[in-house]
Image (spheres, helix red, strand yellow):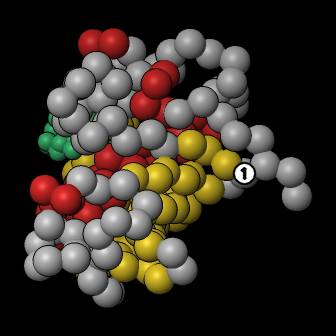
Amino acid sequence: MMHNKSKAIQDLYPDELAHCYGCGKNNLDGYQLKTYLVGDETIAHFLPDEKFTALPGSVYGGLVASLLDCHGTGSAAAFVCVQENINLNEVETIPVRCVTASLKVDFKAPTPMGVELKLRGKLQSIEGRKIWVDMTLSADDTICATGEILAIKIKD
Ligand SMILES: CCCCCCCCCCCCCCCC(=O)SCCNC(=O)CCNC(=O)[C@H](O)C(C)(C)COP(=O)(O)OP(=O)(O)OC[C@H]1O[C@@H](n2cnc3c(N)ncnc32)[C@H](O)[C@@H]1OP(=O)(O)O
């Protein structure tokens, strides 16, 4: 099956809503996480700096959680766009922004330092303004954490 890689969802947030430390394109000190819609799932990659160490050689869990947080809200916005027939390749900004109401993280294995991490998101369900997304964070082929987010679409 062909997968059409879209623009990063965070690059489509309007400037006034793009300052998030984890994923805002306008926050030059932040992580600037980029979430892409690929087929029916979302993907992001991140290589943590050594300063995010927990025990030597492993990544601090708060960073893992914040990557899932921002990948989750970005994924939620992307899935709303799909539902609303907004083609992410044909727009400069999107009228959809989601915030985290609830985030559950399960740490399955230590997250190694020095490896590019891969985040994946799958839509669980959408109910009105509520979007649930299931996520994994992997290093190489090992799932280090799973996450479930409830994101809320901000009112216009
Ligand atoms: C930062 C915030 C400012 C927003 C202004 C816009 C600025 C845009 C900046 C973007 C920034 C991006 C950031 C990226 C990702 C973060 O990290 S976001 C930062 C962390 N999250 C927050 O600070 C959010 C704090 N919470 C809130 O602001 C409000 O509770 C929310 C989430 C916007 C919801 O409030 P609301 O829009 O008034 O909606 P409300 O009717 O209370 O809830 C909607 C539905 O969700 C359900 N619900 C709400 N919370 C929960 C929960 N925890 N568990 C289960 N169900 C829940 C409600 O029961 C309701 O269900 P229904 O009755 O419709 O069935």
Across and down, in percent, residue 103 comes to 25, 62
Across and down, in percent, residue 66 comes to 23, 54
> What's the residue at 34%, 25% (across, down)?
25
Is residue 34 rendered to the left or right of residue 78?
left
Q: Quadrant of ligand 1?
A: top left
Label 1's element?
A: loop
Number of numbered discs on residues: 1
Across and down, in percent, residue 152 comes to 32, 43
On screen, 21 above or below 87?
A: below
Dot 1: within a 10 Å radius of its alpha carbon, few (fewer than 14), some, or many (20 or more) residues? Answer: few
On screen, 113 above or below 5?
A: below
Across and down, in percent, residue 56 comes to 14, 77
> What's the residue at 68%, 54% (across, down)?
40
Residue 73 visible: no
Q: Which quadrant of the view contains residue 115? A: bottom left
On screen, 74 above or below 85?
A: below
